[in-house]
Amino acid sequence: MKGFRDFILRGNVIDLAVAVVIGAAFGNIVSAFVKDLLTPLIAAVGGQPDFSGIYFTINNSKFLIGDFINSLISFLIIAVVVYYLVVLPVNRLMARFKPREAAPPETTRDCPYCLSKIPKAASRCAYCTSEVEKVA
């Protein structure tokens, strides 16, 4: 039981649990926003009072395509919010603290005759066979 207690009281497990609860609450808010405010506005243009009323029937089976549209819009809104309010700021923050890497030294140069890339230490171009000055 001590190992289980240590596992549960570990900081990242509690943080994850809080994130799941907050995420579920945020999902409910966005779903309500889409269902109660956004889709009625969009559906009013098409003459439907709400997307949830859109369906089609095949062999007495009712396919609620409107509920799917509501869920799809909710998902897209959540994805946009998470991307712009979580992913981009964290990426910028991580890039700010990441050490800058020095550019690797150039190991090639251009042949003055044919403009092909040749090694810096070469005394002859491999492409046009012209003699070139050695560069140290």
Image (tube, grey):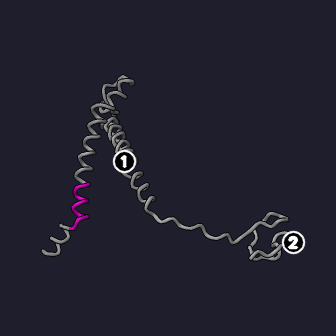
Query: In the figure, 118 relative to 56: above or below?
Result: below
Q: Amino acid at mark 2?
A: Ser
Q: CA distance from mark 2 to mark 1?
A: 58 Å
Judge whether residue 59 can be spotted in this image.
no
Position of 46 with respect to 19 (left or right) is right
Within the magenta stretch, is there residue 15?
yes
Q: Position of residue 68 (x, y in %)?
A: 34, 40
Percent x, y of residue 117: 75, 67
Q: Which residue is mark 2?
A: 130
Q: Is residue 31 visible?
A: yes
Q: Measuring 29% from the left and 34% from the top, which residue is drawn there?
A: 35
Query: Residue 88: percent from the left, percent from the top?
Result: 42, 51
Q: Identify the image quadrant of the N terminus.
A: bottom left
User: Picture quarter containing residue 94?
Assistant: bottom left
Q: Secondary structure at mark 2?
A: loop
Judged from this view, the residue extending furthest toward the right is 130
Task: Mark 2 and mark 1 in contact? Answer it, CB < 8 Å.
Answer: no
What segment carries the magenta color?
10-19
